Amino acid sequence: MGELITYERHMDDYGIIRLNRPEKRNAISMEMTALLKDKIQKAEKDNLKFLIITGAGNTMFAAGGDLSELHGELSSEEAYFRLFPMMEVLESILYFPVPVIAKLNGNALGGGCELATACDIRIAKENTKFGYIQSTIGILPGWGGGALLYEKVQPSFALDWITRGDVLSVQELKDRGWIHQIIEEESWEDEKYLSPYIEKSAQQMRLLKAQYRAVIQPEELRRRMVEEVKASASLWESEAHKKALENFSLRKK
Ligand SMILES: CC[C@@H](C(=O)O)C(=O)SCCNC(=O)CCNC(=O)[C@H](O)C(C)(C)COP(=O)(O)OP(=O)(O)OC[C@H]1O[C@@H](n2cnc3c(N)ncnc32)[C@H](O)[C@@H]1OP(=O)(O)O
């Protein structure tokens, strides 16, 4: 097992941050949250054209928050303080000086979808699936990525997806505008699909992100993201949530 979050600068002037915990389906722990924050700050200083966030392995981009730390015995107040740092990571992606691309190597659930939504562009491998499944475990999105979803797709679709907690196919999510490109398995590794971004200058990319940031207005979004963390934490002690987490921890026993 290597570093839980890796960062490298590619010779074509883009950066790659990788969630590197495939044996736990890239579930995001508190330690990974702190590392993500550090790596994003490091990448900010690297004068990149764009930044990629991806996951290690072939099955999952990220299985959400680490349920062994975000467990059912926490009080709502404790849950709030464990959720909040990842909200700040999502916020730092909004402010990142050039576009951030989620390179979705596999499925995402819960907070994994929130992280993907915080990115500016989502490119996914074919046959992947994605679920804002938090409502099915008695809570709501808790990192601010629900508030962000309302900005990135049609709000009425966002409400229905979050409420139902469905896991949807990559094709349906492309039709809904959440996924920008679907890449066939055999073309995934050659990364030719990155060429349109690599061909632009770092200055163009900075100006493009600045224009997009002016539209999404992170300063305005922050209030709604904080409210979301509070709302999710307020449901932490509910019976439905405790039961769902108990079922998860007992599922293999
Ligand atoms: C709390 C924040 C909240 C938010 O705001 O959004 C969330 O993110 S809630 C979390 C939502 N995520 C989930 O509920 C996913 C839970 N995981 C699963 O349903 C399944 O593990 C899977 C992702 C569908 C993968 O299934 P499978 O391929 O069959 O593998 P395993 O189930 O055997 O898992 C392998 C390994 O990984 C561990 N794992 C998986 N997900 C998590 C997680 N979210 N947190 C912690 N650990 C996770 C799992 O326990 C296995 O570990 P071992 O038992 O040690 O092998």
Image (cartoon, rainbow, N blue to C red):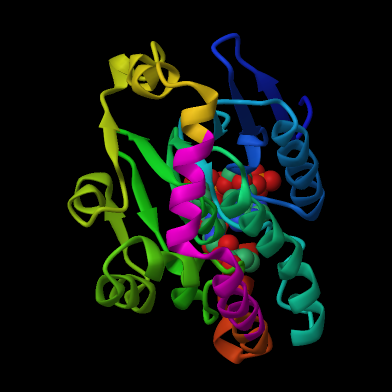
Residue 225 sits inside the magenta stretch: yes
Residue 22, located in which quarter of the rendered image? top right
Which sits in the foreground, 221 or 186? 221
Q: Residue at x 29, y 15 (%)?
A: 186
- Magenta-tinted stretch: 206-230
Question: Can the viewer see residue 101 in this picture?
Answer: no
What kind of secondary structure does the magenta stretch mostly adopt? helix
Where 124 falls versus 196 (above or below)?
below
- Residue 237, percent from left and from top: 68, 88
Which sits in the foreground, 167 or 15? 15
Where 205 falls versus 152 (above or below)?
above
Question: Can the viewer see residue 45 in this picture?
Answer: yes
Q: Residue at x 75, y 76 (%)?
A: 79
Left or right: where 52 falls relative to 92: left
Left or right: where 224 falls relative to 200: right
- Residue 212, percent from left and from top: 44, 51
Where 20 falls versus 154 (above or below)?
above
Left or right: where 94 falls relative to 60: right
Q: Residue at x 73, y 43 (%)?
A: 36
- Is the C terminus in the top left, top right, bottom left or bottom right quadrant? bottom right
- Residue 158, percent from left and from top: 33, 71
Residue 150 sits inside the magenta stretch: no
Q: Residue at x 74, y 86 (%)?
A: 76
Left or right: where 6 falls relative to 225: right
Which sits in the foreground, 141 or 216? 216
